[in-house]
Image (cartoon, rainbow, N blue to C red):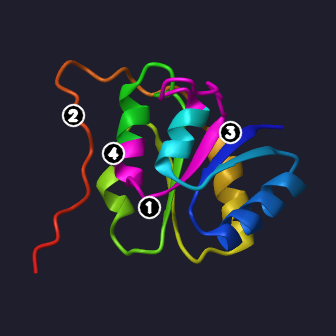
């Protein structure tokens, strides 16, 4: 049984993910915003310091984006080894993180429940700490929208 953090602002998606992962025997913790996730992870003062085995992160969140959260997790020694599955409905957004050391997989919404289960199990079985960011490590940023 793994501890999995789900960060998504869509209650229906959270419900589906929680149901699937609970049936697989995992313990699921949920946050609806980046700020809630930061508190759960202990990245904000007074937080809980939850240490999940995996985090499923929506990249588009209210009140702060998933890019900033993923970057903060990657750069913080307490959370950099937590593998991430990036989930988004917007095409191309998750590709920015393709080479990031803590990104285990990407999911395009809507996703099939079997795809979610396979992706989670693969990420958990292959989860290993990424390299420590060097002195030149920079936060990841979303692609600029030039139209």
Disc on the earlier residue, 4 or 1:
1
Dominant secondary structure of the magenta stretch? loop
Q: Residue drawn at (31%, 24%), measured in percent from left and top?
A: 133
Q: Which mark is residue 97?
A: none
Q: Residue drawn at (82%, 62%), measured in percent from left and top?
A: 19
Query: Pointers 3 and 4 in contact (CB under 8 A)?
Result: no
Q: Residues within 10 Å of mark 4 (few under 14, many from 20)?
A: few
Assign a secondary structure to mark 3: helix
The N terminus appears in which quarter of the rendering? Answer: top right
Q: Which mark is residue 125?
A: 3
Assign a secondary structure to mark 4: loop
Disc on the earlier residue, 2 or 3:
3
The residue under label 4 is: 99
In magenta, the rendered stretch is 41-69
Q: Position of residue 55 (x, y in %)?
A: 59, 44
The residue under label 1 is: 62
Spatial separation of the CA atoms under disc 1 and disc 2: 23 Å
């Amino acid at each position: 049984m793994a501890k999995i953090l789900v960060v998504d602002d869509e209650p229906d998606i959270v419900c589906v993910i929680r149901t699937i992962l609970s049936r697989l025997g995992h313990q699921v913790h949920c946050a609806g915003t980046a700020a809630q996730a930061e508190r759960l992870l202990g990245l904000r003062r007074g937080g809980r310091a939850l240490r999940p085995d995996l985090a499923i992160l929506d990249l588009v969140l209210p009140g702060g984006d998933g890019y900033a959260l993923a970057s903060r997790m990657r750069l913080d020694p307490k959370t950099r080894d937590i593998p991430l599955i990036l989930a988004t409905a917007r095409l191309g957004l998750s590709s920015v993180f393709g080479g990031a050391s803590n990104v285990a997989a990407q999911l395009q919404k809507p996703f099939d429940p079997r795809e979610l289960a396979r992706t989670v199990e693969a990420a958990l079985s292959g989860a290993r700490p990424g390299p420590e960011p060097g002195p030149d490590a920079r936060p990841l940023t979303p692609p600029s929208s030039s139209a």
